[in-house]
Amino acid sequence: EQVAVTAIRPGVEAEEVDGKVRNFYAEKGWDGKFVHHTGHPAGSPWGPWLIKGRREPLKEGMVLALEPGLYEKGLAGVRLEVDVVVRKDGAEVLGSLPLRMW
């Protein structure tokens, strides 16, 4: 999620956030294990899904759920959700869990 959080800003296209997460996983050798979207609107249908092909720009005030999951075979895997609000200077994380994993 930290890669996505860092990429989120008003004006950034939804697919760009997804692409940065996919590139990160590919660099780690996990590209074949990321068969999920990076995120989706939270609490409202207002906002884009963070996935390839969604060129909608992020806007200040959007609330997004970030949940890039890794799966080994079929649906066996892990996915953690972190909710954020798009602010003028980037993403504000709503919660207190540490995001640093690597």
Image (cartoon, helix red, strand yellow):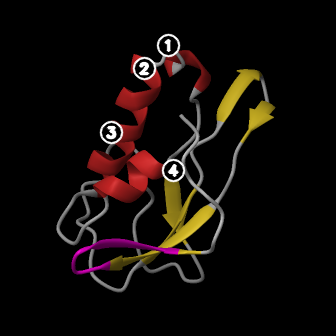
State the image coordinates of residue 89 (x, y, percent, origin top left). Answer: 22, 75
Whole-angstrom CA distance, mark 3 to mark 2, is: 10 Å
Q: Is residue 35 left or right of residue 77?
A: left
Whole-angstrom CA distance, mark 1 to mark 3, is: 14 Å
Badge 1: how crowded within 10 Å, few (<14), some, or many (20+)? few
Give the quadrant of residue 42. Answer: bottom right
Q: Residue furthest left?
A: 11
Q: Which span is picked out in magenta?
A: 87-93
Residue toward you, 49 or 83: 83
Choose the circle earlier in sequence order: 4 or 2: 4
Choose the circle earlier in sequence order: 4 or 3: 4
Q: Tell me the kind of residue under disc 1.
A: Gly
| Residue 20: numbered disc | 3
Secondary structure mainly formed by the magenta segment: strand
Q: Secondary structure at mark 2?
A: helix
Is residue 92 shown in magenta?
yes
Q: Secondary structure at mark 3?
A: helix
Q: Secondary structure at mark 1?
A: loop
Vertical comparison of 63 with 4: above or below: below
What residue would you read off at disc 1?
Answer: 29
Whole-angstrom CA distance, mark 4 to mark 2, is: 15 Å
State the image coordinates of residue 43 (x, y, percent, origin top left). Answer: 60, 82
State the image coordinates of residue 72 (x, y, percent, origin top left). Answer: 73, 20
Q: Secondary structure at mark 4?
A: loop
Q: Tell me the kind of residue under disc 3.
A: Lys
Q: Give the residue displayed 33% in from the left and 39% down from the top.
A: 20
Whole-angstrom CA distance, mark 2 to mark 1, is: 5 Å
Total numbered badges shown on the rendered structure: 4
Give the quadrant of residue 19. Answer: top left
What residue would you read off at disc 4?
Answer: 1
